[in-house]
Image (cartoon, rainbow, N blue to C red):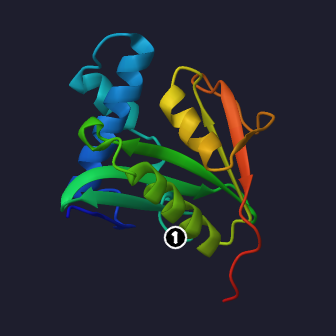
Amino acid sequence: MTSWSLAPEAVDSPDATGLRRDYYAEVASRYWKRPATAEEIDQGLAGDGVELLTPPTGRFVVGRYGGEAAACGGVLMLDAARAELTRVYLRPAFRGKKGASFLLELLEAEAHRLGARRMVLNTRLDLTEARSLYVRHGYDEIPAYCRGEYMEIWYGKELGSPPAP
């Protein structure tokens, strides 16, 4: 039986880089209603702050299905108590195999280990699959905690007290 394995990974590993490129290509292409070019993907990833997704400021996770890089996501500490969920992505061929739920659970645990008591995120209204995932996992719509060109809706979830050191 094929199964998922998920673990923290360096954002610049070959698999993490490929997943981040695929993530940006999909969300940009959906927004622009046309395929993003390689140059546009490079521009979108340049200076995107991904280097902060390492402890103590964050964490990046890669999920593999049957050993193949299939999913990714990150958490970024916004302050001592809040982490932001970011770059959550499953390659289309791996959707519907429960990987998104496993990924979300691990990202919440990683945020908790970093000290977060609350997880927040922002997304676009057209990313309906992602929004459904968040709501299924207990995220509620919240007031905007940040602003940006591609931010249209915000969600939050209490994680509880972080584990004792």
Asked where in the image residue 91 lies, by quadrant, the reply is top left
Q: Is residue 49 left or right of residue 85?
A: left
Residue 141 drawn at (x, y percent): 75, 36
Circle 1 SS class? loop
Quarter of the image for the N terminus: give it: bottom left
Residue 145 figure quarter: top right
Residue at point 68%, 82% (across, down): 163
Q: Would you call the spot at circle 1 few (<14 residues within 10 Å), some (14-19), or many (20 or more)? A: some
Residue 15 shows in the view: yes
Relative to 4, residue 19 above or below: above
The C terminus lies in which quarter of the figure? bottom right
Left/right of residue 35 with respect to residue 8 in the rendered view = left
- Evaluate whether residue 43 shows in this view: no
User: Residue pushed farthest front?
Assistant: 1
Q: Where in the figure is residue 66, as x and y percent of width and height?
A: 19, 60
Say which of 78 and 132 sits in front: 132
Q: Residue at x 27, y 16 (%)?
A: 35
- Residue in front for this viewpoint, 84 or 109: 109
Q: Residue shown at 63%/36% (left/top)?
A: 122
Q: Name the residue under label 1.
A: 55
Quarter of the image where one finds residue 154: top right
Q: What residue type is labelled 1?
A: Pro
Please name whichever residue, 92 or 10, is drawn nearer the observer in this view of the structure.
92
Residue lying furthest top: 33
- In this rendering, the answer to whether 162 lies above or below 13 is below
**Circle count:** 1
